[in-house]
Amino acid sequence: MKYCIAIPSLIDDECISDAVSSYVKNIIEPNVTDEIQFIIHVDNFQYSDSVGTLESTIKLYEQLSDYVKCDVYCDGTRLGLKKSYQFLMKKFLESDCDYLMFYDDDHEIINPMPLSNDFVKTCLADLKYLIHFANAYLQASSEFPFLTNDSVYADDQIIIRKNSNFFYTQPGTIIPRYVVDKIFDDYCSHHVFSSERIVGNLMQKYFNFEILTVCVNSGTDCLKVDGSEFSIPLEDHFSVDGRRFIKAGGYSNKSVFLFDG
């Protein structure tokens, strides 16, 4: 069983330096390195408030090669997000990896990700499940509003919860090879800008998955529902998404979050 972590990237040394460090600490070190590969596409584009060059960004990603197999691609052009995801899916299908997981270049992995957990692997082998690792945005959880209190597994590190409906969040969802193979041609022919929307719609078209969300078992109430209030503690997520998050001080500056916990 081998995982491909695929990342569409822009030029932004500040974000990418923090992200790469988090990959080493919380994806590579807690797991079997032979089971992990990174595939990265760097687009020749940067925001006005970002620093770095194409060469410096590539060099940051190449540090991952000290730990695992890492292929970094860049032809000096700007593909845009949809075609970058398309490129990454193609490279995944050309690899020997079994599962694909996307993260954006500005995601920081904030907790050790248990890809080698036996129950996670058992769920992946069951074709009715799609496994998703809980992800947060700057001021909200992407698990709202579908995550439920109904759990299928718990140990000292993680708790795996059911969801009330199908949803697809690109970052942190593990996509089996047979799914990518099925949807790839349809994806290429789509003209919708949002890659996440295309993949989610195609999954619903061809498959009938039950979504299981892996959360960190922090020992606190993971889910609090009281009328219109919905809160998931930041500590129960595996990743945080957003350049604003990193530029606001990263995980160490928890005051930027509107979470209880």
Image: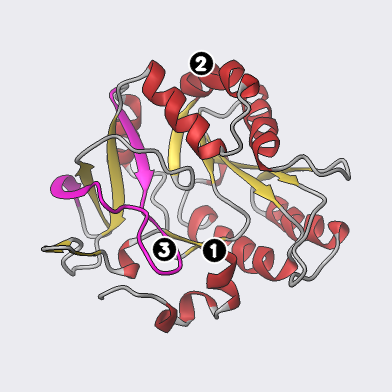
What amino acid does circle 3 point to?
Asn
Viewer-side residue, 222 vs 152: 222
Q: Nearer the viewer, residue 162 or 70?
A: 162
Tell which circle, 2 or 1, labels the residue nearer the N-terminal end: 2
Looking at the rendered structure, which numbered label has been put on residue 111? 3
What residue is drawn where x is 30% and y is 21%? 208
Q: In the image, what residue type sits under mark 1?
A: Gly
Q: Is residue 147 magenta?
A: yes
Q: Nearer the viewer, residue 72 or 165?
A: 165
Mark 1 and mark 3: span between their CA atoms?
Answer: 16 Å
Cα separation between marks 2 and 1: 30 Å
Q: Which residue is mark 2?
A: 182
Q: Amino acid at mark 2?
A: Lys
Residue 104: in sight, yes or no?
Answer: yes
* Residue bounds of the magenta highlight: 128-154
Q: Position of residue 126 (x, y in %)?
A: 29, 24
Marks 1,3: beta carbons within 8 A: no
